[in-house]
Amino acid sequence: ILGHDLRTPLGAVLMASEFMLETGDLQEPHRMLATRMVRAAKRMNKMVGDLLDFTRSRLGSGVPIVRAEMDLARELSHTVDEVGAAHPEAVLRLETSGDLRGRWDCARIEQVMTNLIGNAVQHGLAKSAVEVSARGEPNEVVLQVHNSGPPIPPADIPGLFSPFKRLKPGQTATRHSSLGLGLYIAERIVTAHGGSIDVSSSHAAGTAFMVHLPR
């Protein structure tokens, strides 16, 4: 109920701040402040969406998906562009091969990839490229997001897709920290599509999340 009730006033803040930016009449520092408002409102909106998805999954109804024909290559390109715009310091590379068409929920798959790419940018080695790839197989499409940097501790991997994953003692939350629901919801979305998501992580090979999506 709280999640639904928050969306209306939050939508008003986002719409108003975006309108102020689009008019082009703002001078500094007002333009900078309006830009911060838009980013903050979008982050809050994502948190609300994550909480709603978490509640649905725990109530037994699962994360709802609506399948439709889509071209994953095009959507991945848009997602990489959007994440790159939000993180201009990041180096993102996209590689696609094979037939990437299928029947999936476009918005939900974009949500999965945004979570995985954003996670790689946040935890990857600074100035090291985040590599995103999609490969079309006869019965499925395989997506991978790879980053270099400190590996995930082996003890953390079994619970990595659990909700509200907490920071370990000694780690400090940053301005990019979230509710800890991103990977959990990504796994729930992939499962709702009949697919699977795995992770591998080591000092030598870096960290890679791999998603298998049946067509």
Image: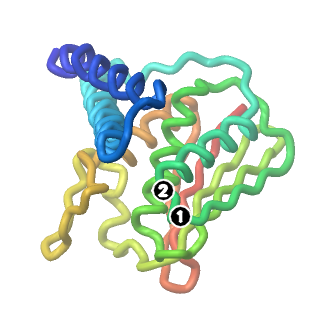
Q: Position of residue 110 (x, y in %)?
A: 56, 36
Q: Residues within 10 Å of mark 2 (few under 14, many from 20)?
A: some
| Left or right: 118 as drawn, with respect to 176 | right
Q: Which residue position holds label 1? A: 90
| Residue drawn 43% across the image and 30% down it | 25
Q: Position of residue 51 (x, y in %)?
A: 26, 31
| Residue drawn 50% across the image and 41% down it | 112
Res. 50 visible in picture: no
Q: Which residue position holds label 2? A: 87
Distance from disc 2 to disc 1, alpha carbons, whole Å, reads 6 Å
Quadrant location, the C terminus? top right
Q: Position of residue 81 (x, y in %)?
A: 62, 46
Q: Is residue 178 above or below residue 73?
A: below
Amino acid type, residue under disc 2 in the picture: His
Q: Is residue 116 above or below residue 69?
A: below
| Residue drawn 33% across the image and 21% down it | 16
